[in-house]
Image (cartoon, rainbow, N blue to C red):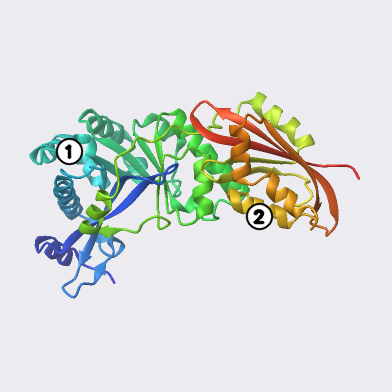
Amino acid sequence: MKYTADEIKAALEQNALCVYYQPLYVTMTSRLKSAEALVRWKKPDGTLVPPSEFIPAAEESDLILDIDWYVTEQVCKTLVKQNILPQFPVSVNFSRRHIREANFAEKLSALADQYELPHPLIEVEITESAMVAEEHEFSDWIVSIRAAGFTVVIDDFGSGLSSLQFVKDVPADVLKIDKSLLSRNCEDEKERIVLESIFSFAHRLQMKTVAEGVETKEQLAFLRSCDCSKIQGYLFARPMPEQEYLTLCQTHQVAEEPADILRFQSHTSAANLLLSVIFRRYPLVIFSNLTRNTYYAMAYQDFTSTNCPSTGIYDELIMHGAMSMHPDDRADFAAAFSREKLLADCANGIHEVRLVTRQLGDDGVYRRAETVDFFVRCNYSDDIIIISLCQNLPD
């Protein structure tokens, strides 16, 4: 259903618009970190009208400016209610029309100061399409907002208008990855390569990252391996009304994000050459975080079996692997590579674990395969990491 500008204006004047909050979580720890404010239109019968049904009409005029400032003030009131609770930053979506609004940063500062709120608690979120449409004015606008102490978030990156050149030149703080880039559940190799590249350049540009639309544990496991800063999606929480969000805040403590573990960012030519040599002998390479119970398979080139998921939960990987072994080898494999046993091995100073088994190939034939786990240390975390190298053995 489409609504007219007059209907939307009346709803605003009657305080029929309300704010819902969708929490964002630290990717590595799944702890609450911040939230995004989302506007809803609540009808007298309690029905909620989603923004997709009225915001486009509001965008056609300056009415969207009034809605954005209304949402911002409601967010300020919510943050004030957190004075005796942990205070988590909240991002507010602003239309690109604000780019041409006189003294935007000063107006936002005055509103935050009116409620005695530290400026970092309010994040300015604007879509990537606005960046492209208002390229010449956008950069100066961002500079003024950041100079006032607010965080700037670029939303919907990768939704179709991405310009790496422009992102490079825009002094934003956070890059929000559009959910469309996770549409194949991080199982598709091309999708993973694109995501890895985005996280890599974002971090090298000193930008935090957020993945939108995270709905599965496979997506979460892969994002943890990519040094994604925060996640947002139905896997953890849907948008919720204010009181429910405040109750959620009560159960969480503000915590610093830990430094990451698997920071494979700068794939130089030398590193790629090294990997190509490793793949000649070990067609299957798996990176696993035993502490976080996650893994990421890097390659499946010409290995005996290729039907294992490319990313996911480590315990499930071992269960899957054991079932692909000869019945006489399953118990040995499960015992040798169980997460509990490997954590104990690491604590006892063992550096590698090696086992030869008979594995069922995709062609239905059992072949001898060797799996070697190497414990490695990471400069960015105390997490227990292993690299598994798997190779086919001659008969």
**Tag 2: residue type?**
Met
| Nearer to me, 93 or 97 | 93
- Residue 43 location in percent, x, y? 19, 71
Residue marked by disc 2: 319
- Residues 387 and 210: in front is 387
Question: The residue tagged with tag 2: helix, strand or loop?
Answer: helix
Left or right: residue 328 compared with residue 19: right
Q: Quadrant of the N terminus?
A: bottom left
Whole-number angstrom distance, CA of label 1 to CA of label 2:
56 Å
Tell me the residue at 36%/32% (across/down).
170
Residue designated by label 1: 104
Residue 179 numbered mark, or none: none
Query: Residue at left 45%, top 41%?
Result: 28
Q: x, y percentage for residue 151?
A: 28, 36
**Residue farthest along the bottom direction in this orientation:** 45
> Could you classify mark 2 by the number of other residues whose Cα lies within 10 Å: few (under 14), some (14-19), or many (20 or more)?
some
Residue 60 lies left or right of residue 318; in this view the side is: left
Left or right: where 254 falls relative to 197: left
Residue at image position (47%, 53%) is 180
Q: Nearer the observer, disc 1 or disc 2?
A: 2
